[in-house]
Amino acid sequence: MGSRIKQKALMERAERVIPGGMYGHESTLLLPPEFPQFFKRALGARIWDADENSYIDYMCAYGPNLLGYRQAGVEAAAEAQRLLGDTMTGPSEIMVELAEAFVGMVTHADWAMFCKNGGDATSMAMVLARAHTGRKTILCAKGAYHGAAPWCTPRTSGILDSDRAHIAYYEYNDAQSLFDAFKAHDGDVAAVFATPFRHEVFEDQALAQIEFARAARQHCDETGALLVVDDVRAGFRVARDCSWMHLGIEPDLSCWGKCFANGYPISALLGSNKARDAARSIFVTGSFWFSAVPMAAAIETLRTIRETPYLETLVANGDALRAGLDGQSKRHGIELKQTGPSQMPQIFFADDPDFRIGYAWAAACLNGGAYFHPYHNMFLSAAHTLEDVEETLEATDKAFDAVLRNFSMLQPHPVLMQLSRG
């Protein structure tokens, strides 16, 4: 990695005018110090930081980059709409076209509503479920991330007990735990929220078990609760439909965000006719929810999803990366844990309870031009090529060497250790 002069100056400026210098999931507070906070540009599968250091990016903006940064077709569609208008007194007619396209692609969906962030969509689903059932309790998996609203944010500073008074929890992939949660709140469960698979930070990923998914559908059918699949993170990276369709399970509601407009700010709640009247009854809105440019980008992105082998490309390149890393780890004698779909990889090291090995390896990968994350699941885009994978594997091989050379000197991240102590 080259110079970090501009990065350092930006961090100092940001610290003066932004609390902590940065906030939220893109803050580098918990990352190794080598990780840049600010970026200048992106194209295809690459990003450039403020000092013009280039990286093959395996975070894809934490998911939104599905087809490649600044993908030509999406950019052309967005620009054509920008010349006509974006945020106007009412939505563009293309809002109807987008809703038609989305509903036509997702099996369970009869209608669509659009917003801006994944947390908007999940919060809307919560309100709608309560309106539909007249009940209060929302069941969520322990540790699952559904956004940063008071009812679901992972950090509780400033959050009141009353904000979560009717949120109850079950263990993901545990049908008995879900049944027990229903029983504990008998007659008051409005909805069950489930992610397509378990994808928490600092944890191995786990694919959904069919018995668990069937139990969720059955309990909701028997009690009248709504089943909500939060597809904000995994949507269209697992299937060209709702991610639980490969299990044969149709939810009542699904939440979408991140990638379906290839980086343009838009999210969606899709639902079945069962919940249509409740959707009409609630008041949800935002000044920029109806902006036309992201909708135009979404229409083109959905067309590309339907008509190209983007998903097969993600899987093939993800498989190649996973196989290459597995071979390298065996040659170096350092055991890797690679979990979840290969196109959304989670990479940890065995016998690394304080993440010192993983952090050192991710930092060394970064120095070699590959942006991996040490505790969050990652993402591939359709712009990643086998050549990118091969170049990445050159960086990861050197990173394994660096970890072995410096093994005795590795230290846990100080901020992470401070948070773990409580």
Image: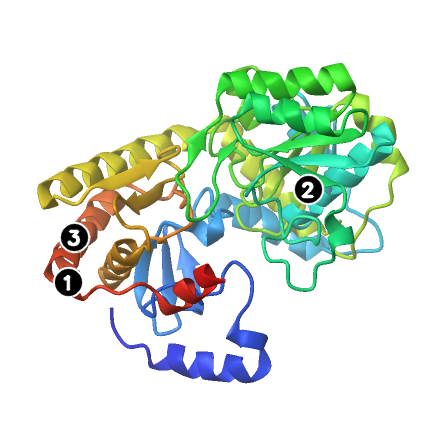
The colour scheme used to paint the residues is rainbow
Front residue of 122/170: it is 170
Mark 2 vs 1, N-terminal side: 2
The residue drawn where x is 53% and y is 46% is 262
Q: CA distance from mark 3 to mark 2?
A: 40 Å
Q: CA distance from mark 3 to mark 1?
A: 14 Å
Residue 301 image-quadrant placement: top right
Mark 3 vs 2, N-terminal side: 2
Q: Report the disc number at residue 408.
A: 1
Question: What is the three-letter code of the residue carrying label 2?
Answer: Thr
Residue 288 image-quadrant placement: bottom right
Question: What is the three-letter code of the residue carrying label 1?
Answer: Ser
Count the marks: 3
Q: Report the disc number at residue 400.
A: 3
- Percent across and percent down for residue 240 are 52, 26
The residue drawn where x is 23% and y is 49% is 392
Residue 369 visible within the image: yes
Front residue of 184/193: it is 184
Question: What is the three-letter code of the residue carrying label 3?
Answer: Phe
Mark 3 vs 1: CB contact within 8 A: no
Return the residue at label 2: 122
